[in-house]
Structures are given as structure tokens and as C-alpha cells.
Amino acid sequence: MSDNEEGDQVPKSSFSAYVAEGDQLYLKGEYIKAIEIYTTALVLQPDDKNCLVARSKCYVKMGDSANALRDAEASLNEDKEFFKGLYQKAEALYTMGDFEFALVFFHRGHKLRPELQEFRLGIQKAQEAIDNSVGSPSSVKLENKGDLSFFHKKKKEGKSVKPKGLARTTKKEQNQQNKKSPKSEKTAKQLLGELYSDKEYLEKLLKDEDLIKGEMRSGEKVQDLILNCISYLDTRTEFWRQQKPVYARERDRKLMQQKWKRAEQSLPSDPTGYVLKSLEEIDATMAAGNVTESLKKAQRVLKTVERWSEETVPNKKEVLGNLHSCIGNALIDLEDMDGALESHKKDLDLSRQNNLTDAKSRALDNIGRVYARIGKYMQAIEAWEEKIPLVCSSLEKTWLFHEIGRCYLELECFEEARDYGLRSLEAANETGDEKWQLNASVLVAQSEVKLGNHNSGVEHFERALEWAKLLRDNPAKEAIQKALSEARQYLTEEST
């Protein structure tokens, strides 16, 4: 949809309502409608990065990689370390067949959020696609050493670097492609599946000379339209071939049949792809608010993966831990705290048994959240303090120190609450995150007032008020103004 079309739409509902509707349409597979709804939402908030990512996902599903990449990059305009935007940019590049650059952004996201399974699986699938396309790294020698120097050199020489199969097909090239060997046609049939009959139908239409001379209402020639459709299917065929060659799929299937001997449930031809897709579906369902369905999906996948051997899934323990984590998070939303705690402890046990640092950090994080929700603040503190050495980013430190400080404040351990509040504020200042600068300032102010340090309390409340005004957070502003007024009254009483 063009920018002009976006501007012509007059939103009749709230931004959050449109986003929620778009999420539901996405889950139903109605991607065109979802794109329209997200576009209307973006009229209200043009720079909302989460909505841009959501629309980008729809474009990926529609095969519109260019618009998917455009939205993903737009979501990173203000925050280059927005991990959802980085992941979506990597996905868009991967879908375009630009596997090398996709790998770069999967790595970049993994460095920022090492606890997320999506980035690790993305790195794995991008590397496999590169190997399938050009062979293993040891068989490829670039002229200039370095990460992307090969591509920079091509640009300097005036040559564009395009992934295989993405260049637009000319009529001459299309005629040559129509004369493919029986072997290549068999490969295309296996890769395209049901779409292969559509491709055959389109190729038959090309032989109708009267038809191809016609034009559509839009003025586009019928011949060009048919050629573009065939070119797209050829692009998909090449893309899927690079992801997993047919001979490899056949070989894997035969090996699995020999190993499992017609087990009760057949193993997917691509276990890694199955796990990745399942985790994405679980996360998407959860994000759309359908917690019960997300829980059921995670439980089904867990039972499936538990039956697989570690030869089939080399990182089986890591996958199981991630699924226990998904189940635990869903149970938290369903207010089943006992079940949530049990699932997150299973995640923690697996991480400790297999020395999985990222998984351990995630599990301790979630265990602390459960304990805090049920009012067991000391147990929450113990879990979160064990997590501290595992934290790398300043943003995560900001959140963690703040939550530990809040627990100490609830326990009326005001000095510890203030100290953790100051640590949270320091980390927030490093990241420049205004929201967490606000939260940390309020925590320090509350602690100082409880300790009788009213001057310091007033000072931090005043800073927090500035952040609230900057963020246009009216509820926070009103609450801070009330607390600030009370703190100033204490000072007045002390001076009299």
C-alpha cells in the first residue's frame, strides 16, 4: 500500500484496537487484511516499532520481501538495538535469499539477546542455507579477508550482488527455463508441491498467442503478468532448494524411517524447521493474547520433542528447556503459579545439567517473577541475585536491579532498596532509556523518603517528574506529583 493510500484512511478506532485486530488476522492466516489493519494503525502512530514489525511479518508470509525489509528497517530507525526489529530484518533478508546478510543480523540480535532461542535457530538455518548454496565455508575463498569485504568490493566495481534466483527473468531466459531437463522438473515438482500444477497451468497459458496479447484493466500485459508469476515460482523453487536440497530431504527421510521403523508419530523431514516454526507460532499466539492455545501448542511440541533422540535434535535439552519456559510463561498469565514455578524449575534444572548459561539466566529470571507475583519476595531476590553475574547488557541490568530493589522495598529493607535503585539508575543512564530512568528514580526517591532522607527523596522525585513529562506519561506524572508534594511537606515539617 502506498503512502498516499495510508494518508487517505481515516482511523475510526484506537491504535491498540487496530493492532489487536491485526494480530488476530495474522494468526488466522489472513495476511492481506492484517496488513490493511496494521497500516491503519500506523496512521495513528507512524513510528510504532512493534506495529512495523507485525506488518513486516505479514509481508514475509505474502512473499513480499522488499516491503518486509522496509518495515523491519523502519522499526530500527530510532533504536538500532531493538531486538524484534533486528530479528525481523534478518528474517526478511533470509526470505529474499540474502543468507549472508541475514546471518549477520541473526548474530547481531543474538549478541544483544543471547537468551532468545529465535536468534540461535536463525543463525543455524542461515548457515545451513549458505552451505547448501555455495558449500561449506572451508571450500570458499574470498579475495579479501574479513566479514563482508567481498560484497563491498563488488559494489566498488559497480556490480550489484544479488542472491541466486532473485533477478527478474527476461522473456528469453524464460523460454530457456521452459526447456528444463526431466530431472530438474522432478526436483521442482517435489519442492513446489501443490504449486507445481499452477506453474504447469501458467506455462500452458503462455502458448495461447491470442491470450498473451491481451491487457489487464490496469494496462499490464497478460504475458508480463504470467511471466512474473512463473518467475516468482522459480524464485521460490531456488530458495527452497538452497534451504534444503531435495536429495538431502530424501536421504534424511530414509534414515529416519530405518531408525524409527514406522514409529507412532512420524518425524518431520526438517526437525530444526519444525522446532523453529513451532516456537514462532507459540510466541505469536501468546503475543495475540490467546494464552490457552499457546499453552496447548507448547505442550504438544514438548511431547513430540521428548520422543526424539539427541542425534535427531543435537540441542534437544536446550529445546526442551525453551518449551518448559514457554509453558511456564503461559501458566503465569493463567494465574497457575504453582504450575508455572514447576515448569521454570525444570528449565533451570536442564540448564544446570547441560551448562546452558543463557537458559539458566532465563529460568532464574522467570522463577523470580513467579515468586514476586505470589509475594515471596526473598525467594525472588535469591533467584534474581543468582542471575546478576549472567547479565551482559545494561538494559537487562536496569530491569533486574529495579525488580530486586522493589522486592527489598516491599520487605521494608530500605537501604538495600535504595542501593539497587541507584544501580538501576546508573545502568539506565548508560542505555539512555527514559522509561527506566523514570522507574529507577522513583524507586530511589521512595527509598530515601522511607529512610528519612527527604532532601534526596525530593530531588529524585523531581527528576522522575521530568522524565514523566518527557514521556507524556500522565498517570505516572500525577502519581509522582502527589508523592513529591508529600515529600516536600515532610521537609517543611522538619524545618519548623
Image (cartoon, grey):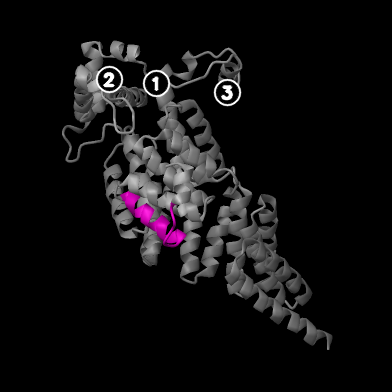
Q: Which kind of residue does numbered mark 2 sit on? A: Tyr
Residue type at mark 3 is Leu
* Location of residue 331 by image quarter: bottom left
Residue 147, x across and y down, in percent: 58, 24
The quadrant the N terminus occupies is: top left
Q: Please, which residue is most extreme toward the right here?
A: 495
Q: Is residue 199 magenta?
A: no
Residue at x 44%, y 58% (from the top left corner): 11
Mark 1, residues whose alpha carbon is within 10 Å: few (<14), some, or many (≥20)? few
The residue sitting at 44% across, 27% down in the picture is: 127
Look at the image and tell me whether residue 283 can be seen: no
The quarter of the image holding the C terminus is bottom right
Residue 168 image label: 1
Residue 92's place in the image compared with 32, above or below, is above
Circle 3 — which element? loop
Residue receiving disc 3: 148
